[in-house]
Image (cartoon, helix red, strand yellow):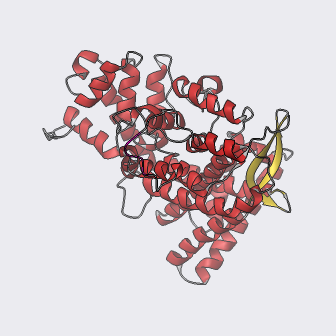
Amino acid sequence: MKIQEFSTEKIQKLRDFRIHDVDSTRKNEKRNEFQRDYGRLIHSPSFRRLHGKSQVFGAGSGDYYRNRLTHTLEVAQIARVISTFLLNQTENLPKNPGLVIDPLVVESASLAHDIGHPPFGHKGEHDLNKLLQQYGEFYEGNAQNFRILMYLENIYPDHFGLNLTAAVLLGINKYPYRLKDNGKKGLYDSEWEQISALREEWNIPNKCRTLEAQIMDLADDIAYSTHDIEDGIKAGKIRRDSIFYNHIIDELIMEICDSKDIELWDGLDKDEMKEDIISLLTEYLNVWEDKVNCSNEVIGRQELKAHYVNEFANSVGIIKVNVDGNDWYKVTFTKDGKEDISLMRLMIVLKRLVWVTLVKDIRVQRLQMRGEIIIKGLWEVFKDQESGKKILPKGWLERYDEDETWNWERFIVDYISGMTDNYADKIYSELYGSRVGNIYGE
């Protein structure tokens, strides 16, 4: 099915649309709608809290390693650069609001892409989901993004949420389906209804994402496969010798085989796949060796990161695809007008290398176990409504009492998930340990 086209005026109206139609006295006519969105995100409490949430290593593990905020800023920078590169490739695309690229929209979506992640990284996400599943509900970081942005953030007197434009909301929509339908990723029912309505107005085919959302997602992968690798090298967990890679190669292949990324190796048997991955890692090690030989270990490590960020970002292009009988366009690595599968494979290998060397590292596992103990401990205290209300912030309780659709279990998970690592640790210590709380803090 062909892509529906709209007039230029209609496209701008659809992209500028806000769900809450309020005539706010805060509106500054000197800023366009996307500049306002950028400001709302940067100044939001949820964005500030990213500085205290784990990326791979625990927040506060050292003054070098990335946290969720520094990762987010790096994703936003890469995404904006890619957006600028791709502007000339959109000139001949069908006139559809989902096929427009505005670098500020992409940067704003990137700033918000991890805002729903809880304390203690992906392990915290898993633990909260496990707690909610006892009550037939789910917790998922990407879904929580939209819950925060569209409901939980409470900084305006006339509506809940940040009331972002449709363009930015759909630019964050990495998984364009309901969480219940997909089982692992997607949106909660409460936000999917509105997001789905926006997608229908834009005439975006099922399972397809805006170009801006695709750029944000790819920039996230680029950052993960280069910057987190740099952290791993700094920590001594990723080394520059073939013995190290020979030791982990089978575990790395198993990790890829257990993910959706295995599709990139369709048509290869396991031996051929192993040979391909070894070849990609050998090439990576050769580049690393050259960078070190031209300088030293520290500068070489930084140059290695910069080399691959540059190679990945400069290789991004747009190709036409067909998704379940519908025409659309895909943002991916390209070479000679086609998808560059080899470069995609390299990025995935580096992403999974982070997982098998860092996330599974004993120190990281201990931090994650501590996070699980803290989250479960907070849940045990807060889950009893009568006693929980005595120790929860007044503002949160007022919101809860105003909303009859908010069940207590979801309310508690929403509250815990917004905490930084250190704040969750602090509250846990006040409840279970010897730390004395500050009577002026919530």
Q: Position of residue 184 (x, y in %)?
A: 60, 30
Farthest residue in the bottom direction?
294
Tell whether 438 sits left or right of 313.
left
75 or 223: nearer the eye? 75
Residue at 39%, 45% (x, y): give it.
367
Please state, as top left, top right, bottom left or bottom right, where the N terminus lies in the image: top right
Please state, as top left, top right, bottom left or bottom right, where the C terminus lies in the image: top left
Residues in magenta? 24-28
Tell whether 186 sits left or right of 98.
left
Q: Position of residue 420 (x, y in %)?
A: 35, 44
Residue at 43%, 24% (x, y): give it.
131
Q: Position of residue 211 (x, y in %)?
A: 69, 48
Residue at 37%, 24% (x, y): give it.
411
Is 411 above or below relative to 267? above
Q: Position of residue 303 (x, y in %)?
A: 58, 74
Is 292 above or below relative to 181? below
172 or 26: nearer the eye? 26
Counting the numbered discs, the total is 0
Tell whether 329 sits left or right of 148.
right
Residue 237 in sight in this render: no
95 or 74: nearer the eye? 95
Is 398 above or below relative to 112? above
Tell whether 248 sits left or right of 133.
right
Snapshot quadrant of residue 346: bottom right
Residue at 41%, 23% (x, y): give it.
410
Snapshot quadrant of residue 342: bottom right
Main secondary structure of the magenta stretch: loop
Residue 40 in sight in this render: yes
